[in-house]
Image (spheres, rainbow, N blue to C red):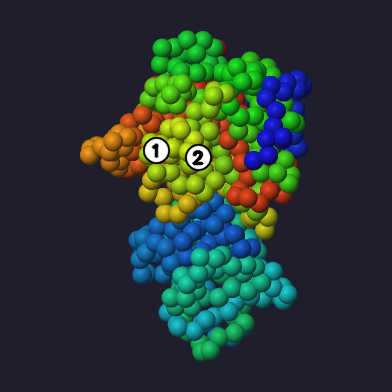
């Protein structure tokens, strides 16, 4: 890390900022403004996939959002009896060279009546591949079409996606021009926008054109059954906490369970004991909440945007922690601006810090393990050469996903999770953990709360006091007040003096490859407490 890029205490008073319109996933424009009231999550249609290279693979329905199949390899489908992975197709047809038509009336009628269109799942019982023309094929009349006849007339609907995947590779394929179907080796998902069809369907025909095959054979049509995702709380019940009794967090810092509560009106070392921000970071007053948020930046060509940390446990003159914190809740608000997202690498986000290291005479911990590919041991060790105690701890940061830049309809959404260093990680670098089915988008605030409870330690103990780490460390996450993740078998420490060092507001691109563009984010309303905090009460 090049500390020359950082300053502490920069105050750049800024007026309200308005950002350009962005796509909301349905075709409507949505604007964002720092002065706007807290909006609901932008609506993105469920079940969309993509054929440009970031769609299905053997492990994922969407590699862009890292949404996994329930049944890796072949993927997930519903049959004509609505049985998961069932064997009764909605339609079956003979495939030979040239155009074919399959009667899919019952399935399309199901989508129209339910309002839920998951798409077609295609498979074949033949060992050789059928190669079909895709939606961008040079011969226009060969492209997939859905011919729908209803009481209001006949509509010809163009294919919006013809994705394919193979159980033999983790990669997604660009199948826009052509796609294949073969028994056990290639499967396909076709999607059509039927949102303008409102009347009962009298007839629906799926038209395909086979470009090559070894022999004639049969193609079966099922209904796709992909996983869903959640963008914010949606309609789920939010859990209320300490913050609910303190509108806009005013007075929350005085609550006996609260260790720290504040905004970013002060980013000096008086409030944030360690770390810094890039020089172009600004502080913006939000007139709706009364708080000051931090408008941060990971600059193009750099990797680091913010390293501010609220240290909870300092050290003594003997170089040991002044106390041990083993269980805390940490909450912050995040807003991703329109320029956010990298197609090169994921990014680190705020989370807990338990690295410790050695206590410097200047009044901060100098970590030796727990990030940057230095795996933790959880031990207290004596550095005889330096004549000091060192603690080989871990970090527990957040983790955010990438862009695809291949036209994916979910390119303004990002998977989110944890980047967890712990004693049982497989390699030198932390474990990337996705909060299942949770995504965040641009242009709105999200409340993220992370709970940690350090693992217990049992004997026998060595002469330094290091014991056996028990697999009972806990980590839970809430997004907008709805639980998003839970795991209760972590191991981070072997010495009882080790615990939670602080709450680390780390924004980092990668990896080691720098950001491809300027990437702006915002943070606000940080709280650390001994009880569940919950979303900010924005009702006066």
For disc 2, the neighbor class at 10 Å (few under 14, some 14 to 19, many from 20) is: some
Question: Which image quarter holds the N terminus?
Answer: top right
Count neighbours of disc 1 (C-alpha within 10 A) and say few if under 14, some if 14 to 19, many if 20 or more: some
The answer, for residue 145, to whether it is visible in the render is no
Instruction: Please provide percent x and percent y for residue 15.
Output: 77, 22
Q: In the structure shown, which secondary structural element does the residue marked by tag 2 occupy?
A: loop
Total numbered labels placed on residues in the image: 2
Q: Which mark is residue 472?
A: none
Closest to the observer, 340 or 372: 372
At x 40%, y 57%, the residue is 70
State the residue at coordinates (43%, 75%): 184
**Residue 17 makes an appearance in the image:** yes
**Rendered position, 86 above or below 436:** below
Report the Cα–Cα distance between label 1 and label 2: 11 Å
Q: Which residue is mark 2?
A: 368
Residue 45: percent from the left, percent from the top?
Answer: 56, 48
Name which quarter of the figure residue 256 lies in.
Answer: top left
Residue drawn at (72%, 35%) of the image: 5
> Which corner quadrant of the image does residue 291 belong to?
top right
| Residue depth check, mark 1 versus mark 2: number of the one nearer the observer | 1
- Residue displayed at 59% across by 73% down: 179
* Mark 1, residue position: 381
The answer to whether residue 30 is above or below residue 317 is below
């Amino acid at each position: 890390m090049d500390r020359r890029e950082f300053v502490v205490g920069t105050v750049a008073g800024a007026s309200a900022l308005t950002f350009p319109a962005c796509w909301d996933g349905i075709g409507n424009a949505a604007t964002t403004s720092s002065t706007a009231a807290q909006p609901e999550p932008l609506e993105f249609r469920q079940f969309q996939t993509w054929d440009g290279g970031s769609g299905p693979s053997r492990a994922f329905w969407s590699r862009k959002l890292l949404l996994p199949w329930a049944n890796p390899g072949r993927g997930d489908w519903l049959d004509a009896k609505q049985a998961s992975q069932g064997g009764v197709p909605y339609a079956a047809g003979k495939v030979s060279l040239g155009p074919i038509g399959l009667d899919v009336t019952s399935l399309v009628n199901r989508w129209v009546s339910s309002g839920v269109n998951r798409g077609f799942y295609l498979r074949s019982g033949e060992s050789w591949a059928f190669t079909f023309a895709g939606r961008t094929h040079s011969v226009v009349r060969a492209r997939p079409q859905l011919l729908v006849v209803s009481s209001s007339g006949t509509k010809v609907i163009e294919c919006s996606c013809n994705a394919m995947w193979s159980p033999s590779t983790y990669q997604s394929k660009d199948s826009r021009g052509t796609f294949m179907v073969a028994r056990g080796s290639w499967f396909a998902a076709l999607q059509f926008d039927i949102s303008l069809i409102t009347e009962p369907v009298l007839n629906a025909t799926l038209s395909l054109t086979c470009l090559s095959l070894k022999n004639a054979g049969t193609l079966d049509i099922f209904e796709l059954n992909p996983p869903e995702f959640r963008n914010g709380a949606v309609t789920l019940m939010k859990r209320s906490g300490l913050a609910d009794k303190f509108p806009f967090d005013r007075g929350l810092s005085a609550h006996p369970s609260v260790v720290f509560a504040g905004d970013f009106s002060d980013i000096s070392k008086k409030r944030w004991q360690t770390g810094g921000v890039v020089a172009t970071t600004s502080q913006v007053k939000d007139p709706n909440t009364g708080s000051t948020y931090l408008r941060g930046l990971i600059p193009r060509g750099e990797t680091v945007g913010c390293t501010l940390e609220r240290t909870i446990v300092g050290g003594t003159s003997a170089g040991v922690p002044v106390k041990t914190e083993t269980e805390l809740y940490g909450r912050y608000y995040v807003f991703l601006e329109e320029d956010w997202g990298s197609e090169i690498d994921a990014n680190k986000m705020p989370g807990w810090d338990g690295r410790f290291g050695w206590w410097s005479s200047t009044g901060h911990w100098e970590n030796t393990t727990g990030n940057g590919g230095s795996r933790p041991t959880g031990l207290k060790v004596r550095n005889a050469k330096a004549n000091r105690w060192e603690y080989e701890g871990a970090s527990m940061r957040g983790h955010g996903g990438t862009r695809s830049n291949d036209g994916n309809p979910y390119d303004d959404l990002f998977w989110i999770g944890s980047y967890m260093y712990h004693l049982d990680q497989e390699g030198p670098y932390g474990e990337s953990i996705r909060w299942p089915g949770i995504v965040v988008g641009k242009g709105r605030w999200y409340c993220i709360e992370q709970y940690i409870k350090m693992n217990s330690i049992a004997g026998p103990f060595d002469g330094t006091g290091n014991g056996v780490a028990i697999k009972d460390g806990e980590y839970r996450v809430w997004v907008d007040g709805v639980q998003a993740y839970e795991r209760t078998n972590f191991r981070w420490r072997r010495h009882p003096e080790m615990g939670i060092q602080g709450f680390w507001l780390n924004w980092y691109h990668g990896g080691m490859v720098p950001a491809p563009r300027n990437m702006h984010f915002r943070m606000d309303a940080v709280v650390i407490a001994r009880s569940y905090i919950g979303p900010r009460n924005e009702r006066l």
